[in-house]
């Protein structure tokens, strides 16, 4: 998972349309995507099913938590949240995304408490003034692709980050 987070941190959104989510703004005007909005993710904490969704109410980002999976049931959190230095993009299209799950178990059993987290995928992201990249996924893997231009046109390298 650390490799996935590190890979995401390398990219900033290109000059195209930006999807709904939270972004860290760079000094040169780029935006690094960190969280897609309008995505429900599930978890189990201390044996209790929970779910959470980040969304906007107008231009204000909100965190909504639920007792139960699927972002339904009793609302246990419904509050504006501080993006801690990031900016909210509340308009635009819904982001393409993948959800990955992290278990608290240390024995690789994939059982017990877990948390899910969404990542933005299939967006051409500018790495620097000469390269771009993209995070994509299929049913069996998540991968990063680096391109030799700023528009995701000339593939240089693809690396699988996770494969089932």
Image: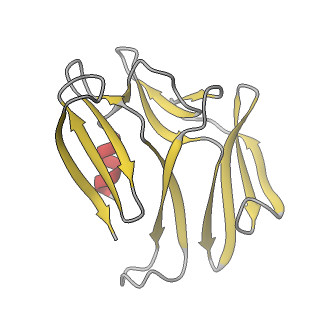
Q: Which colour scheme is used?
A: secondary structure
Q: In which quarter of the image is the N terminus?
A: bottom left
Which residue occupies the extreme front position in the image?
A: 153
Looking at the picture, tell me which residue is in the foreground, 58 or 97.
Answer: 97
Looking at the picture, tell me which residue is in the foreground, 154 or 79.
Answer: 154
Residue appearing at x 29%, y 35% in the figure: 133
Residue appearing at x 60%, y 31% in the figure: 93
> What is the x, y in percent for residue 152?
29, 30
> What is the x, y in percent for residue 108?
36, 81
Give the quadrant of residue 106: bottom left
Which residue occupies the extreme right position in the image?
A: 74
Asked whether, in this view, residue 154 is left or right of residue 118, the answer is left
**Vertically, is 84 above or below 138?**
above
Question: Total number of numbered labels?
Answer: 0
**Vertically, is 150 above or below 76?**
above
Looking at the picture, tell me which residue is in the foreground, 103 or 12.
Answer: 12
> What is the x, y in percent for residue 82?
62, 35
Asked whether, in this view, residue 128 is left or right of residue 47, the answer is left
């Amino acid at each position: 998972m650390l490799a996935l987070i590190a890979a995401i941190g390398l990219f900033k959104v290109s000059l195209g349309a930006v999807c709904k989510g939270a972004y860290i703004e760079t000094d040169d005007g780029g935006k690094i995507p960190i969280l897609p909005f309008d995505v429900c993710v599930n978890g189990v904490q201390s044996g209790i099913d929970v779910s959470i969704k980040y969304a906007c109410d107008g231009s204000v980002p909100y965190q909504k938590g639920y007792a139960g999976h699927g972002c339904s049931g009793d609302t246990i959190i419904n509050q504006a949240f501080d993006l801690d230095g990031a900016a909210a993009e509340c308009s635009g299209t819904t982001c393409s995304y993948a959800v990955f799950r992290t278990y608290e178990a240390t024995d690789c059993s994939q059982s017990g408490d877990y948390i899910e987290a969404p990542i933005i995928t299939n967006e051409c992201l500018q790495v620097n003034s000469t390269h771009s990249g993209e995070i994509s996924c299929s049913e069996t893997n998540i991968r990063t692709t680096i391109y030799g231009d700023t528009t995701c046109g000339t593939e240089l390298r693809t690396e699988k980050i996770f494969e089932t």
